Amino acid sequence: MRRREFISLLAGAAAVWPLAARAQQATLPLIGVLSPVSAAIAVRNIAAFRQALRDLGYVEGRNIAIEYRFAEGMSERLTTLAAELVGLNPSVIVVGSMLGIMSASKVTRTVPLIMIGGTEDPVRLGLAESFARPGGNVTGFLLTADQDILGKKFQLLRDAAPGISRVGVIANPDAAGDAAELRMVPSVAERIGLRYRLFEVRTEGELDAALAAATSDDLQALYVSWSPVLNFHRARIVAIASNLRLPAIYGFREFVQSGGLMSYGPDLPDQYRRTATYVDKILKGARPGELPLQLAEKYELVINLKTAKALGLTISESFLLLADEVIE
């Protein structure tokens, strides 16, 4: 199936399915998927999730049904979309962000929720009793937001662009993952020997203001955090970084595919594949509170060599050998 056809299927299936088919689907175990971004951005992750389900013996329309909701980068929609999915009486809901899981947990304390991509401690947030035994209706797969990961990203940025000393940090302080990173930025930046300026981005309007401010500041590089609103608007962020001729590092490879210099972050399709195994266990009777919270196992460094050349950067062979993927 072509990428465009797959996206069209996700967006339009609910409108065109015959009533008889939807009635039949209603008798199948229903899996809800709540994504903070769009179908286009999530296509690689959703494809990995669906394939993993097929590998486990689940076929949509035959023994399971799946309902998707996409927040299109607007976090204020997450609670409403979560309520829509809960209203469909699903067997389980897969939620693709920490803010999404927090929104969904306000809607239901009974429907099993599997999170993907959270970087904040769910125990501290009151979503789980412990990592080994969450105890409630929330479990899932977390990213790692710690000083080592943040320090590595800052160091990779410096290695790619030697001599930089002032970095613009673009982040959403209202997003749990970004907030966790922001608490670490001062000490990590000092250790690496970088000065930074924070640009807070919660909405599209604030993104415009932040990018405008970045154009007039004496910056030498950009660091872009995890927030879904940033991922959703990645093309604009990458374009501004290119226009300003600023090397930048991002949390997800989609930025690099859009022309960004490099990314270092978790392999999200792998997270979605692992999530399918928890869906399988829950459909077979396991309780989410008995399934341990797990951390990301695979991180990847992706470099866009074409962008590096456009910025006038000479990337050493030894640095390229560190990359999991080089886009030329």
Image (spheres, rainbow, N blue to C red):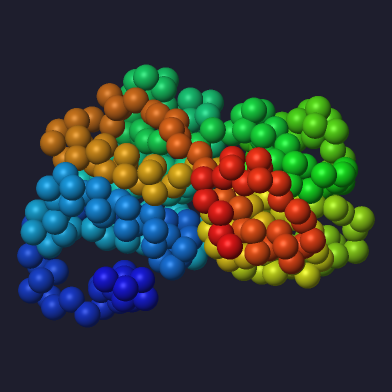
186 and 112: which one is in front? 186
| Residue 288 spot, x, y in % from top left | 28, 32
Going by the image, does 210 lie left or right of 148?
right
Going by the image, does 131 lie left or right of 223?
left
Q: How many marks?
A: 0
Going by the image, does 255 lie left or right of 122?
right
- 310 vs 94: above or below: below
| Residue 159 spot, x, y in % from top left | 75, 41
Q: Residue reaching furthest front?
A: 317
- 69 vs 51: above or below: below
Q: Quadrant of residue 146?
A: top right
Q: Is residue 203 visible?
A: no
167 and 22: which one is in front? 167
| Residue 172 spot, x, y in % from top left | 66, 50
Q: What residue is shown at x 66% (from left), y 28% (from top)?
A: 147
| Residue 57 spot, x, y in % from top left | 12, 48
Q: Quadrant of the N terminus?
A: bottom left
Q: What residue is shown at x 12% (from left), y 76% (from top)?
A: 19
Q: What residue is shown at x 14% (from left), y 33% (from top)?
A: 285
Q: Quadrant of the C terminus?
A: bottom right
Q: Quadrant of residue 2?
A: bottom left
Q: What residue is shown at x 36% (from left), y 33% (from top)?
A: 139
- 175 vs 71: above or below: above
Q: Is residue 302 visible?
A: yes
Going by the image, does 164 lie left or right of 176?
right
262 and 318: which one is in front? 318
